[in-house]
Image: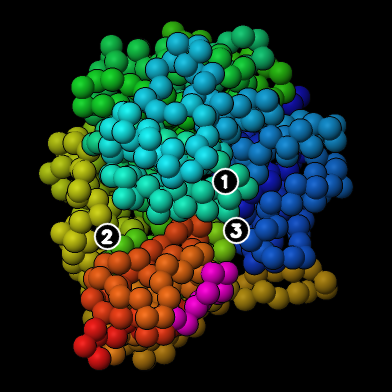
């Protein structure tokens, strides 16, 4: 018998679809929820039944804990799976689910609460003998505390939101003069993203590897680790590429950090699938950083090398069953790599790039997996994370996995917004990645961005040529149209002839990327994206240097610093904190100092 009759997945997009697939294999009914912005999307159609969790702002729909629980009861679901993001690591939501008589497919609320406070987690880990990064274990009251700690343990430091995660609420401090700005930025992000302005400080370890360990724990005192994942390739503390095994971890080190992860899970009273994140120094030291109390985006690579379905393990653990594997049963076979295919513009510093998907074709073949919630005609919304898909490959060793990923990336076709496909191709062929180094200074370099653009242009020209054909036939465009027949909703995909000016418009958009987010000859500084102004750092009449911060704009859950393109005087400030801005909207004017 299935462990549950129905499970509601309190999430959207690819992770909702990923959970539904396992539920179906277990014979469990799938219940989806959706916002107004997600009406008719792939995860809605993939479920057995779906419920609107509005009205209200679409970005907040998946955060309405009471509505989600009420919806699960109305659908007669017996359990809720939170996916990742949104309320997945919200202890209050976990308690609310259980108080309603439903099963929470995740760790105990107490473990979420403990690991959600990075200061409390550091104290607990230290008491349990788990090595932690040198720094504070209590929240800091002001920037002066940052300076004091810097005098004690030295710079650089990193300020982190105490309730943070996912790379948000983190600011590096290289000296005392940066403490005030970094403290304000980290507290602001902590308040906005986690409703907690508390921050703490650690020693900033330079050129480390970000190595995390997957753990499984049940209610029968069984805890195992499933090896490590190397998540070193990041931009703005956000992961881009994950792989397992790590090219820097041998069998002895794997056993050591695996024991650390198991000890950490036991100290937290953990149950379910979780990830112990840590930093591996060039000298081989391994430090606990935090524990993610949910399924991870990159769980896919662990599934590839272990042959385990981690979502299945989550569901069965929640149903009270013991783990399906013992530590001695865990064998890592081959090598797996995941590339996150985001709607981001590498040429513009990885700026989020929402837009409509006009063409979409996934790669296939041996050892290739794509997890996505996007189809042709869908809009990548600025309301949510910019991820379009996760591309995962598996092969017998790292060299062959890299070759397979490059082949799969070349097959992947996405048109509409700019994506990271060209970036990933440029990175995976770069000697730093091939050699297994950390690629410090390479990921966000102009050199790699230029190579990524060359690969994108080469692919674009080739696919355009193929699409038009030898006879010059005009390509078609797929459009999704919603229709109703006898009161039932259907999605109809129409293939219509692309207008003759469409290709020209695409090329103009590509050329128009120049000047985005910068200033023109008149000193006008415009917004490179649609978003919300979080902070304005200048006032009219202020002198500014080239590269000096003007304001901070949030888009797709990422903070983007808008800086002055030149030395000058601020003559006009056209935005204020909390204001919405559109692409190309005036931020301010930086006039020449001589004017």
Disc 1 marks which residue? 197
557 with respect to 182 (left or right): right
Q: What residue is shown at x 31% (from left), y 62% (from top)?
A: 349
Structure colour scheme: rainbow
Residue 317 lies in the magenta stretch = no
Q: Callout 1: 10 Å neighbours few (<14), some, many (20+)? A: many
Of 533 and 432, the residue lying toward us: 533
The residue located at (28%, 32%) in the rendering is 154
Residue 230: image location, x then y, percent: 33, 33
Q: Is residue 33 above or below residue 263?
A: below
Indicate the secondary structure of the residue bearing disc 1. Answer: loop
- Judged left or right of residue 53, residue 203 is left
In this picture, which residue range is highlighted in magenta? 573-581
State the image coordinates of residue 434 (x, y, percent, origin top left): 17, 40
Residue 537 on image: x %, y %: 42, 67
**Residue behind mark 3:** 42
In the foreground, 511 or 112: 112
Query: Secondary structure beneath disc 3?
Result: helix
Q: Determine the residue located farthest toward the left in the rendered image.
A: 431
Q: Which residue is mark 2?
A: 422
Type of secondary structure dominating the magenta stretch: loop
Residue 412's disc number = none
Could you say which is closer to the camera, residue 429 or residue 115? Answer: 115
First in sequence, mark 2 or 3: give its number. Answer: 3
| Quarter where residue 504 is shown | bottom left
Specify whether 26 is left or right of 471: right
- Crowding around mark 3 (Cα neighbors within 10 Å: few <14, some 14 to 19, many 20+) is some
Q: CA distance from mark 2 to mark 3?
A: 25 Å
């Amino acid at each position: 018998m299935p462990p549950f009759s129905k499970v509601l997945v309190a999430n959207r997009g690819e992770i909702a679809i990923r959970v539904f697939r396992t539920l179906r294999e277990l014979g469990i009914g799938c219940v989806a929820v959706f916002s107004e912005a997600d009406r008719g999307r792939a995860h809605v159609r993939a479920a057995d039944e779906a419920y609107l969790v509005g009205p209200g702002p679409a970005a907040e729909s998946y955060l309405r804990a009471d509505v989600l629980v009420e919806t699960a009861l109305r659908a007669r679901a017996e359990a809720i799976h939170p996916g990742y993001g949104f309320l997945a690591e919200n202890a209050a939501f976990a308690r609310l689910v259980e108080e309603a008589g439903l099963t929470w497919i995740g760790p105990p609320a107490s473990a979420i609460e403990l690991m959600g406070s990075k200061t409390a987690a550091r104290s607990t880990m230290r008491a349990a003998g788990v090595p932690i990064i040198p720094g504070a274990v209590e929240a800091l009251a002001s920037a002066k505390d940052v300076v004091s700690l810097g005098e004690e343990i030295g710079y650089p430091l990193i300020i982190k939101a105490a309730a943070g995660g996912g790379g948000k609420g983190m600011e590096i401090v290289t000296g005392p003069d940066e403490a005030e700005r970094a403290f304000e930025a980290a507290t602001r992000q902590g308040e906005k993203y986690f409703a907690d302005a508390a921050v703490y400080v650690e020693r900033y370890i330079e050129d480390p590897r970000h190595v995390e360990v997957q753990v499984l724990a049940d209610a029968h005192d069984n805890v195992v680790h499933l090896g490590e994942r190397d998540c070193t390739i990041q931009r703005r503390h956000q992961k881009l590429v994950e792989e397992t095994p790590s090219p820097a971890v041998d069998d002895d080190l794997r056993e050591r950090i695996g024991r650390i992860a198991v000890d950490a899970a036991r100290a937290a009273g953990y149950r379910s699938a979780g990830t112990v994140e840590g930093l591996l120094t060039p000298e081989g030291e391994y430090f606990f950083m935090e524990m993610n109390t949910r399924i991870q985006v990159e769980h896919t690579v662990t599934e590839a090398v272990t042959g385990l379905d981690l979502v299945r393990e989550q569901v069965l653990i929640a149903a009270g069953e013991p783990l399906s594997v013992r530590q001695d049963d865990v064998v890592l076979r081959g090598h797996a790599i995941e590339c996150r295919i985001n709607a981001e513009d590498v040429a513009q510093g990885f700026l989020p790039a929402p837009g409509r998907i006009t063409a979409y074709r996934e790669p296939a073949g041996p050892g290739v997996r794509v997890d996505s919630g996007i189809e042709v005609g869908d809009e990548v919304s600025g309301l949510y994370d910019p991820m379009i898909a996760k591309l995962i490959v598996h092969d017998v060793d790292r060299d062959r996995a890299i070759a397979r990923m490059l082949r799969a990336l070349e097959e992947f076709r996405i048109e509409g917004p700019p994506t990271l496909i060209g970036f990933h191709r440029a990175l995976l062929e770069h000697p730093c990645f091939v050699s297994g180094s950390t690629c410090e200074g390479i990921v966000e370099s102009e050199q790699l961005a230029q190579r990524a653009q060359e690969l994108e242009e080469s692919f674009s020209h080739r696919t355009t040529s193929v699409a038009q054909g030898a006879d010059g036939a005009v390509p078609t465009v797929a459009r999704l149209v919603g229709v109703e027949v006898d009161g039932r909703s259907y999605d109809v995909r129409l293939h219509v002839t692309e207008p003759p000016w469409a290709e020209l418009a695409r090329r103009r958009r590509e050329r128009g990327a120049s000047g985005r987010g910068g200033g023109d000859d008149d000193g006008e500084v415009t917004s490179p994206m649609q978003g919300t102004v979080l902070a304005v750092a200048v006032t009219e009449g202020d002198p500014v240097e080239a590269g000096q911060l003007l304001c901070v704009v949030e888009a797709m859950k990422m903070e983007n610093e808008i800086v002055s393109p030149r030395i000058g005087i601020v003559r006009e400030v056209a935005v204020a904190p909390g204001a919405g801005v559109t692409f190309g909207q005036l931020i301010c004017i930086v006039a020449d100092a001589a004017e």
